[in-house]
Amino acid sequence: DPKIIQKPKYLVAVTGSEKILICEQYLGHNAMYWYRQSAKKPLEFMFSYSYQKLMDNQTASSRFQPQSSKKNHLDLQITALKPDDSATYFCASSQGTFYEQYFGPGTRLTVL
Amino acid sequence: GQQVQQSPASLVLQEGENAELQCNFSSTATQLQWFYQSPGGSLVSLLSNPSGTKHTGRLTSTTVTKERRSSLHISSSQTTDSGTYLCAIDPSNNRIFFGDGTQLVVKP
């Protein structure tokens, strides 16, 4: 059974719209993260949460808003979508911020 | 500047040969991980090795913390090892910085 679930696997959106990317982890971890991988670029850290509180935000745009309704959930809301937002978005979790991180399968977002 | 640098950028091997991948980093790393990214894009954690030597299966990682470098040795490579190997460090306990990766192709 998958331990980190990301939904949907693929997502196509139009410029200017809003989407929510879902992430749930069943590893009992306390820390969760979002990363982005654009074409031909290294993975980039976006956010980290620990015990449902924001620890670090390296995303310049306020269009990206993480939402943690439960300890094992960290969704990512993206508003006013742009073609440059097209990327694969990975969710990750770890037991704590010192610990090894485990990644979900990713959501591939395409903005037309 | 980039915090994590990997070499070589790409590597082509014949099945059965060994591979040596290098990772150099510019910050003190409290955590260092090697990942495998499949051609389809999925990420799998291979080893967590902030210092010393660790083995798992055909993989051996050696990290020399004070020299800010780590290596990943793949022995007896197989075609299914083809993909991208990523080195990542966590210097601040809140995030990971990834290298550009080494793209490995293992030919039958």
Image (cartoon, coloured by chain):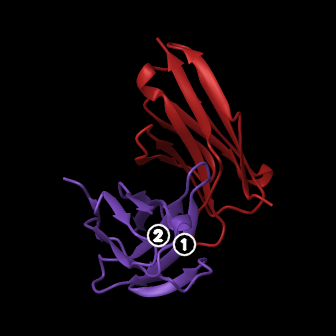
Chain colours: A purple, B red
Q: Which residue is drawn at 38% across and 79% down?
A: A18
For disc 2, the chain is A
Residue under numbered circle 2:
A34
Q: Do labels 1 and 2 share a chain?
A: yes
In this rendering, the answer to whether A60 lies above or below B34 is: below
Chain ID, mark 1: A
Q: How many marks?
A: 2
Toward the left, the furthest residue is: A1
Q: Quadrant of residue B17?
A: top right
Label pair 1/2, CB-CB below 8 angstroms: yes
Is residue B95 visible to the viewer in this orientation of the structure? Answer: yes
Residue B81: x and y, percent? 46, 28
The one nearer the camera, A86 or A30, is A86
Task: Tell me what residue is drawn at x 69 percent, y 35 percent.
Answer: B9
Q: Name the residue under label 1.
A: A46
Disc 2 packing (10 Å; few <14; some 14–19; many ≥20): many
Alpha-carbon span between mark 1 and mark 2: 5 Å
Q: Where is residue A17 in the image (x, y as percent from the top left)?
A: 40, 78
Q: In this view, does A7 lie to the left or right of A64?
A: left
